[in-house]
Amino acid sequence: MPAPARAQVNIKLQFGARLGPEVGVFAYAPERWGDWHTSYRKWTPVTLYDVNGHYYRTSVAGARPVLVYSYQGQYFFPPQDHAWIGFDKRYNYQHQPTPTDYGRVRPYEAPVRVDPRLGAEIGVDAYAADRAGDWHTAWRRWTPVTVYEVNGHYYPNSVAGARAVQIYRYQNEYFMPPHEQAWVGFDKRFNYQRKPTEADYGRVRPRP
């Protein structure tokens, strides 16, 4: 079975570290990717890098390599069957996922059709003072940006039914404004009629 999890390391990164976009990784689902005994040759082993519980294509100091599979543009963990161990000779089992990896991965979800006019999805993080600075003094460096929310995802363009949400951009990263009452009305550039809802704040995660 998967190797025991090693101690997790909290990797400190400078703002704007070149990790690239986070890679969404699913649990293996035979109804999506086929029975592994016969379908595994169609899958491509790909090395991703675990940084504070998130997966990226780029490695940084302290990142842990994790070998996953890729098929038709989606990434997923290998099967957890004991018989899979050693079965795929292309796979480097020294980098197989740990129980911690399997515990955090999300189950496969059928893709939802997205209007291409929305543009590429924007990754939005929670505000973090250690990355963006204390908002009382750093807010002038941030740029208010309006994105459009559809089914819990954010995009640069509007279509019918999309909800406008104003957030901030700094050094090519996007994040929610501070979640403090004192911030409301503080930044005169910000359109508070489009401020994030509690649902917006609840769905974003801190950037590692």
Image (tube, rainbow, N blue to C red):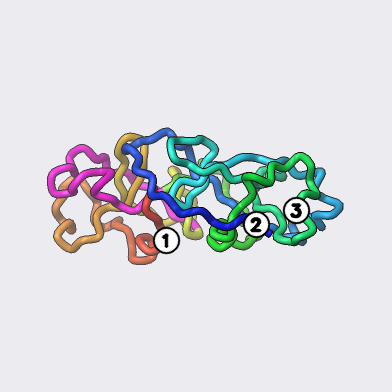
Instruction: Please provide the residue range marked out in magenta.
Output: 124-150
Report the amino acid beneath label 2. Answer: Pro
The N terminus sits in image quarter = bottom right
Query: Do the residues bearing badges 3 and 1 touch, measured as CB atoms within 8 Å?
Result: no
Does 100 sit above or below residue 168? below
Tell me what residue is drawn at x 45 percent, y 35 percent. 60
Name the mark nearer the viewer: 3 or 1.
3
Q: Amino acid at mark 3?
A: Ile
Looking at the image, which residue is at 69% across and 42% down? 92
For the residues bearing labels 3 and 2, Cβ distance under 8 angstroms: no
Q: Please state which of residues 82 and 133 is positioned toward the viewer in this rendering.
A: 82
Residue 179, by quadrant, is bottom left
Q: CA distance from mark 2 to mark 1?
A: 30 Å
Using a 10 Å C-alpha cutoff, classify the residue at mark 3 as few (fewer than 14 neighbours), some (14 to 19) or many (20 or more). Answer: some
Residue 132 at x, y = what percent?
A: 26, 43
Q: Residue furthest right?
A: 38
Q: Which residue is mark 2?
A: 2
- Asked whether residue 118 is in view, the answer is no
Q: Earlier in the sequence, mark 2 or mark 1?
A: 2
User: What secondary structure is marked by label 2?
Assistant: loop
- Residue 74 placement, left or right of 186: right
N-term mark: 3 or 2: 2
Pointer 1 residue: 203
